[in-house]
Amino acid sequence: MQPMPPLDRTAYIAAMRQKMETLLGQVADAVNNAPDGRIIAGSECQVRDLFADLRQQSYELALQMRTDAAEAAFSPSEGHRVGEGPAE
């Protein structure tokens, strides 16, 4: 089995940058919208959930990009064409 090629680190970071910036804005909003005197209690669960969603999205994207890189590097065996069986 051939090793899988790595995902493009720069492309991955670029793809995640907007999601991260959006998340940080949502964290700031959660903290700012929490009631005075209850900032932690009023924002902690929302912030935790925001980061959990980002963690999932970032991991799924990394896995997909690595899979896509492997598929792009795949070369069908000689003598085969898409839609045809093995050469006889």
Image (tube, rainbow, N blue to C red):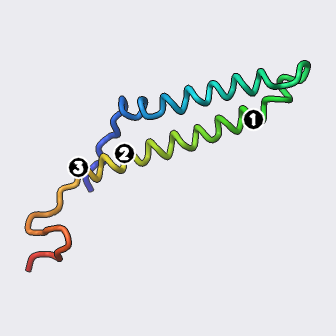
**How many residues crowd around disc 1 within 10 Å: few (fewer than 14), some, or many (20 or more)?**
some
Query: In the image, residue 54 lies at what x, y percent?
Result: 59, 37
The residue under the point 13% across, 69% down is: 80
Chain-order first, disc 3 or disc 2: 2
Locate residue 10 relative to residue 44 in the image: left or right: left
Query: In the image, residue 1 lies at what x, y percent?
Result: 27, 56
Q: Which mark is residue 66?
A: 2
Mark 2 touches mark 1? (CB < 8 Å): no
Residue flagged by tag 2: what amino acid is it? Arg
Q: Which residue is mark 3?
A: 73
Locate residue 75 relative to residue 19 in the image: left or right: left
Locate residue 45 relative to residue 59 in the image: left or right: right
Chain-order first, disc 2 or disc 1: 1
The residue under the point 43% across, 46% down is: 63
> Dot 1 lies on which element?
helix
Residue flagged by tag 1: what amino acid is it? Gln
Query: In the image, residue 71 lies at what x, y percent?
Result: 28, 53
Cα–Cα gap, marks 3 and 1: 41 Å
Considering depth in this image, is 5 or 12 the residue closer to the camera? 12
Q: Which residue is mark 1?
A: 46
Chain-order first, disc 3 or disc 1: 1
> Dot 2 lies on which element?
helix
> Dot 3 lies on which element?
helix
Query: In the image, residue 59 lies at what x, y percent?
Result: 51, 42
Instruction: Look at the image and tell me in which quarter the C terminus lies.
Output: bottom left
Position above or below: 9 against 32:
below
